[in-house]
Image (cartoon, rainbow, N blue to C red):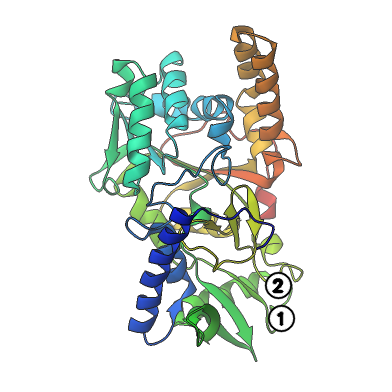
Amino acid sequence: MSRLPLPDADALAHSERLRAVIQEQIFASGGAVAFSRFMELCLYAPGLGYYSAGATKFGGAGDFVTAPELGPLFAACVADSVAPVLRQIGPDAVFMEIGGGSGAFAEVTLKRLLALDALPARYAILEPSADLRERQRSRLQERLNPLLLDLVDWLDGPITAPWNGVAFANEVIDALPTPRFTLRAGDVLEEHVALDGEGRFIRVDRPADTLLAAAVRHVERQLDAPLDDGYRSELLPQLPYWIQAVIGGLRSGAMLFVDYGHDRREYYQPARADGTLRAFYRHHVSSDLYAWPGLQDLTASVDFTALAEACSTSGFDFSGYCSQASFLICNGIEQRLAEAEAKARDEAARYRLRQETKRLTLPGEMGERFQVMGFARDVEFGAAFLAGDLSWRL
């Protein structure tokens, strides 16, 4: 922790207020809460959680940089990939973005879909954070023309009525509060958070419930060997229920997910014996998950095999799985770069665009660490997944 930049006094006071809320929950729960509940409070406690309070999260002044924050190229390529789907659905198509970030993705996507003559009837943003909603609203009011702005609305929950369109999520599943498990003498235990004698958070393990234990055994059956005693990792047995809840009444259309993670065999490698959970604070990665609740992001890599299973059980057909680099190349990033460079004001702007492309596509940057997975029902993506197929890994 000593190498991390220290929060200021106001931020520390904010964190202490959330710490007190979590401590009260631990007392009320008989001395421990499941790690997933701890993570949920750290990220989403009303007015105090990382995504619910007002601190800057995205970009150079925040804790991490997402692909849409780098510039316009990522969102433009996503728009190109879903335009055929929206055209197939027709005039009632809806585009639902799950977690709107700063609004950068919505801005570019709407402008690009307009250029492609593939605008949806509605651009819905499912955003639980009131603070982020206001940031998105402010950005879009400033940067969109009235025609495009009129298409945007913010949802208080999933669209429960029948609808047709596209559901899109970039770096969302990694932020779902996840259970953690470990194995001891052949039994499955679930990680909990308790308090020591001085009120500090500590790890304790308790017997896992039936759902988590069955999910761990399901994973083990697909691996080359059972997980070792003491192995600890993350698993989201509730992911199928989350998918079905978040898409609501989606009938015909597509789902598109972008995130960092691994296929199941890679995810649960013996060498990864303490899981993938980490904290992000001011562009630093930390293994101290208990430090400064509400000030640091907590995130776990995605098991893309589990995502494929969850979406398939929701009645959608698997469309493709590839690296972010392959997806962007297949969906026109070279052409979008050339167009943007031609319109750039000066060499400095062109340099930024080239750097953006490198960060999005190089293996040592986002290109291989992030993957893209798509699903469809009654529609087809077209050329979106024609390059770099990784489905054989699943």
Q: Residue furthest bottom?
A: 185
Find residue 93 and report its horizontal and vertical position in percent.
33, 30
Q: Is residue 124 left or right of residue 269?
A: left
Question: Where, quadrant-wise, is the C terminus in this rendering?
Answer: bottom right
> Looking at the figure, which quarter contains the N terminus?
bottom right
| Mark 1 closeness class: few <14, some 14–19, many ≥20 residues within 10 Å | some
Q: Residue at x 40, y 20 (%)?
A: 118
Q: Nearer the viewer, residue 311 or 20?
A: 20
> Please, which residue is most extreme toward the front here?
9
Residue 41, image x, y percentages: 40, 65
State the residue in front, 188 or 342. Answer: 342
Name the mark on residue 273: 2
Q: Amino acid at mark 2?
A: Ala
Crowdedness near tag 2: few (<14), some (14–19) or many (≥20) residues, C-alpha within 10 Å: some
Dots 2 and 1: beta carbons under 8 Å? yes
Q: Residue at x 32, y 58 (%)?
A: 46
Q: Secondary structure at mark 2?
A: loop
* Gap between marks 2 and 1 measured at Cα: 9 Å
Tell me the amino acid under the disc marked 1: Asp
Q: Position of residue 171 (x, y in %)?
A: 52, 46
- Res. 197 in view: yes
Identify residue for label 1.
228
Horizontally, residue 7 falls left or right of residue 1, namely left
